[in-house]
Amino acid sequence: MPWKKFFKWFRGIFGKRKAIRLGLYGPPNSGKTTLANKICRDWTGEEMGKTSEVPHETREVQKKEHVVVESDGKKIEMNLLDMPGIATKIDFEEFLGFGLSKSEAQKRAKEATKGVIEAIKWLEDVDTALVVMDSTDDPYTQVNITIIGNLEARDIPVIIVANKIDLKDAKPEAIKEAFPQHPVIEVSGLKGDHVEDLYRAIAKHSR
């Protein structure tokens, strides 16, 4: 085989960058799946998963592979991972107010607890993390601090998403003040506001 053809073949086999594993982390109902659905619709034409007002709708890691994001002339191929919401305590009684029966609530709480454990295990395999926060909530929570601390300890690039900026009482500046060491992108996953800024950040900070 001629050398030029050999090197072209070699680069084709070994030089292609693998798809990054991009994990969406955050507390329940911060809008992770809504944002994941928006990303998937933009770049694949399909949605990631079901959303609901009931906490812990996502109780297993949801995956969408080969999502190719283009921004500023750069292409990033991602395997998108929508993680179950992280919580320090899951009580079945919190679901009763949403109309679930006791048995349904207990089942949901058990599945949600397993989902939290699964999401934490995935920390070992994520290349870049989007930490999604509801910008109407206080960012100084044990969950947020714990998630970011665990990602930092593993030297995983973090992009914080100040979500739900379409709501009247949104305060994304509070998130920026709480976590100045990381890029904070203000978006509305529901309405799609400023998602282009998020795509630029993913292209810039992912590895």
Image: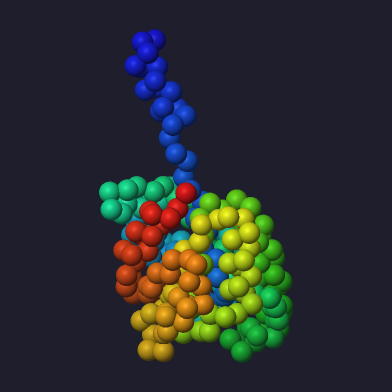
Image-quadrant location for residue 185: bottom left
Residue at the spot x=63%, y=59% of the render?
153
The outermost residue toward the left is 73
Number of dots carrying numbers: 0
* 131 vs 138: above or below: above
* 129 vs 31: above or below: above
Residue at the spot x=38%, y=60% of the render?
201
Left or right placement of residue 151 versus residue 173 in this view: right
Quarter of the figure with the N terminus: top left
Q: Tell me residue 179's x, y (percent).
A: 51, 73
* 129 vs 15: above or below: below
Q: Tell me residue 193's x, y (percent).
A: 32, 73
Q: Does residue 51 appear in the picture of this structure?
A: no
Q: Tell me residue 49's x, y (percent).
A: 48, 64
Image-quadrant location for residue 8: top left
Left or right placement of residue 205 versus residue 192 in this view: right
Q: Does residue 114 appear in the picture of this structure?
A: yes
Residue at the spot x=59%, y=61% of the render?
152
Q: Tell me residue 102's x, y (percent).
A: 71, 83
Looking at the picture, the colour scheme in use is rainbow
Give 59 or 71, whichever is nearer the viewer: 71
Left or right placement of residue 102 versus residue 68 in this view: right
Residue at the spot x=38%, y=73% of the render?
186
